[in-house]
Structures are given as C-alpha cells and as structure tokens.
Image (cartoon, coloured by chain):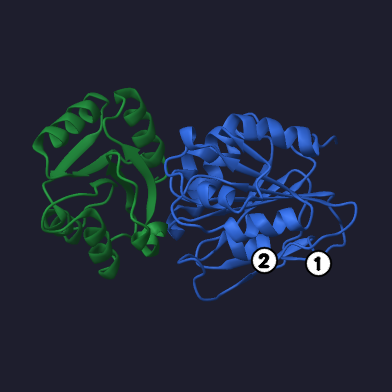
Chain colours: A blue, B green
Amino acid sequence: MPLQTVQNVVVIGSSAGGPRILKEMFSGLPKLKAGMVLVQHMPKFINQSLKESIERVTGMVVAIARDGDALENGKVLIAPSEQHVAFVQNRGVRLFNGQKVNFVCPSVDVAMLSLLRFSGMQCIGVILSGMGRDGADGMAHIKHIRGVTIAQNEETCAVFGMPKEAIATGCVDYVLSPGAIREKLIDLVGIAHR
Amino acid sequence: MSKNVLVVDDEPVVQYSIKRILEEAGLNVTQAGGGRECLDLLRKGYKGLILMDIIMPEMDGWDTIQALVDEGLNEGNIICMLTGKEIPDAKMDKLKEYVLDYIRKPFDNQKLIRVVKDYLNFLD
C-alpha cells in the first residue's frame, strides 16, 4: 500500500433514503482535501449506479473500493455490498467477508470503529438517513478520538433512525441538512488544490 | 432507463392516484393489491421499481419483502416503501438493506416523480 498520508479522513454512513440524499449532498462538492469512504446499505446490483450517480454531480473522484486501496485526497471510496470495510492505519482500506453487524454488511460501525487517533490527522464521521442504529457506536468512537461528527437533521431524512441514535450518544457535534453538511465539510477540510 | 414501476398497495385510491401521476410522467405502471399479487408478478419475471405499502392485510410490506428475498426475487428490483406517519418497526432491521428509500404519504406529485425517476436510472 502506498505511504501517502491524508490529513483528513471522512466516513459517511447512509441507509434508506441515502442514494437521493447523497446526490444532494455531493452536488457541487469540489475536490476536498480529504480521503472519503462511503458506506451505503444497498443491494449489490446498484453499487455501480450509485457510483455513477454521485460522480455525475461532484468534482470528487468516485470509485468502488477494492481491498488494499489507499485513501487519496479528493477521492471517495464506496464500500461494495456484502463486504465489510475497515481502515488500515487511516491510510487505506481492507475489505473482508464477515457476519452482518447491526444486521448489515458492510456496517458503518465496522468502518468507523477501525479509525485510529493520529496527531495531525482529522477524522470526520457523517451519519445520514436510515433505519436502526448502525453507525451510532462508530460516531461515538470518532468523537472519542477527537474527531468531528455530523448527523443529518430529522426534517430532511427519509428515516430519522440512524441519526437519532447517533445523536442519543451525546457525541454528535452538528445536526445539519445535506446541503449544510456539504458546506461544513468544505469548512472543515478545505478544497484540494492541484 | 427502465420505466417500470410496480405499485403494491391494498388501497385502490392510492394505487390509481400513483398510477395516474406516474403514467402522465411517461412511466409504465403495474398495480398489485397485495403481497401475493406482487410475488406472482415477480415470479413471472417482472423487473422495475417497486413502491410497497407497509400496512396491508394478510401479508404486509415486510412479509412480502421477506418472501421475495427468500425466493431471490429482489435481484434487479429496487424497493421503496410507501409509509404514512408510522415509524418503521425496529424489528424489521434485518430487512433494511433491501429497502432503498421511504416515500411518505401523502406525497407531493412532483417529488414522487423525481424520486421514482432517480431510482429508475439506477436500473439501467
């Protein structure tokens, strides 16, 4: 795995309603100075369609994650269905088969809980619309490693389950609409310059 | 883009209302009055976007999804739930990865068309 280190890691967890909310959130989002991983609960056959839907509206590079991929500034890695994704030293990802966690695979919690605290590196967790509580423990973990946490607000959620559970942990910094999340991410990590 | 939408709802008024709105938007709408009818259509090879009511007599939306997942009929079909004010039951967590969205009733016509067309694009 390349030794490139990103200064900012963003993990987005999303479930029901996510595909259209992600399109709104990514709309007009420039290349950020961050490596991003997206965990969307979805059937496998739409992985590619989701990738294309997001890359049509953003300046970020979008790819389906492969085992061993490195994080890169300005790039979104989408966790493929039916495999968990975990970070390796916050620099890359590994994919692995495993039992469902919170009834899903990939699980947002598995990804978020694998983040480590490194000085000079900022971790950001974003939890979007969805049923259940996947991501709640992960968001608390990100807060505990001194990261920043953002949950989607109730008004704009298809289902206010996952954000509600994350907020209930007391570890969410911001509760925002998809458009406001986009602006907050730009504020927090900045735009990547070539 | 696929143009096929299957509306599964036991209330004829809802069925016809959605059918009219989506057909005027150029989509092909098929109706099913309940879970069993939905399963019959899928067994015959129907592919498209399924708008599924949650509360239905005999076989509710969740029972229907469980049955179609058990038979592998979800492959190639996108499922969105039609809901009123009810909050999805946490017991149904195990089926959540098969449901891509929730559309609240009563719905705004233009928003319904936009969301449905967005998801049909996923079926290319």
Q: Earlier in the sequence, mark 2 or mark 1?
A: 1
Identify which residue, B68 or A129, lies in the foreground: A129
Label 2 CA crowd tier, 10 Å (few <14, some 14–19, many 20+) = many
Number of marks drawn:
2
Q: Which residue is mark 2?
A: A86
B66 to B89, vertically: above or below: below
Q: Could you tell me which residue is drawn at 30 percent across and 46 percent down?
A: B81
Percent from the top left, x then y, of residue B121? Answer: 41, 40
Point out the residue furthest to the right here.
A120
Label 2 and label 1: CA atoms lie apart by 14 Å
Q: Could you tell me which residue is drawn at 64 percent across and 62 percent down?
A: A111
In-image side of A15 versus A181 (left or right) = left
Residue B67 shows in this picture: yes
The chain letter under disc 1 is A
On the same chain, marks 2 and 1? The answer is yes
Identify which residue, A175 or A192, lies in the foreground: A175
In the drawing, what numbered circle is on residue A1? 1
Looking at the figure, which quarter contains the N terminus of chain A? bottom right
Q: Secondary structure at mark 2?
A: strand
Looking at the figure, which quarter contains the C terminus of chain A? top right
Q: Could you tell me which residue is drawn at 48 percent across and 65 percent down?
A: A104
In the drawing, what numbered circle is on residue A180? none
| Front: mark 2 or 1 | 2
Q: Secondary structure at mark 1?
A: loop
Amino acid carrying mark 2 in the image = Ala
Amino acid carrying mark 1 in the image = Met
Percent from the top left, x then y, of residue A40? Answer: 53, 53
Residue A65 shows in this picture: no
